[in-house]
Amino acid sequence: MTARKSDIALSARLTAYVTREEGAAELRISPSTWDELVDSGQIPKPIRLGRMGTILRWRWADVDSRLRGDDADTLEPYFRALGNGTAKDRKRNVAA
């Protein structure tokens, strides 16, 4: 059974990775509404953890960024560079 959102105690600082219930409580919505937001793409899909991939967590920074509509601009430099071709391609461009 799902805990009532009013019964979920939130820490003073939200953790980096939240459960479905913690995320819903932070947004003051029900867990089923959280599920609808995930299904519609308004909240990113969860990260699967554990040996069987049954533990679901959402990175709060990604959730917050998606809700603000600026998640495309917040890629970490490493991931942004991955979209710039291979290292070999970049060396060719510099040499040209």
Image (spheres, helix red, strand yellow):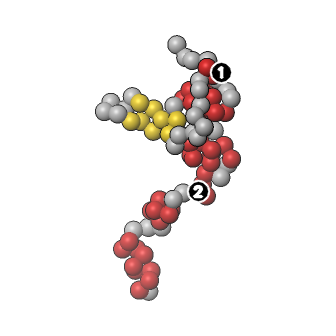
Answer with mark 2 or mark 1, whichever residue precedes in sequence: 1
Residue at 67% x, 48% y: name it.
Answer: 69
Vertical comparison of 65 with 6: above or below: below
Q: Nearer the viewer, residue 93 or 76?
A: 76
Please state if 80 lies on the left or on the right of 41 as rendered.
left
Compared across the picture, whether 7 is left or right of 50 comes to right
Mark 1 lies on residue: 6
Q: Position of residue 72 (x, y in %)?
A: 60, 54
Q: Quadrant of the C terminus?
A: bottom left
Closer to the eye: label 2 or 1: 1
Q: Residue at x 40, y 80 (%)?
A: 92
Q: Farthest left residue?
A: 51
In the depicted view, which residue is nearer to us: 16 or 84?
16
Label placed on residue 74 = 2
Q: Is 12 on the left or on the right of 1, as rendered?
A: right
Q: Which residue lies at the image location 66% right of the left edge and 43% below the top edge?
A: 67
* Nearer the observer, 62 or 91: 62
Q: Secondary structure at mark 2?
A: helix
**Is residue 60 shown above or below 40?**
below
Residue 84: percent from left, percent from top: 48, 67
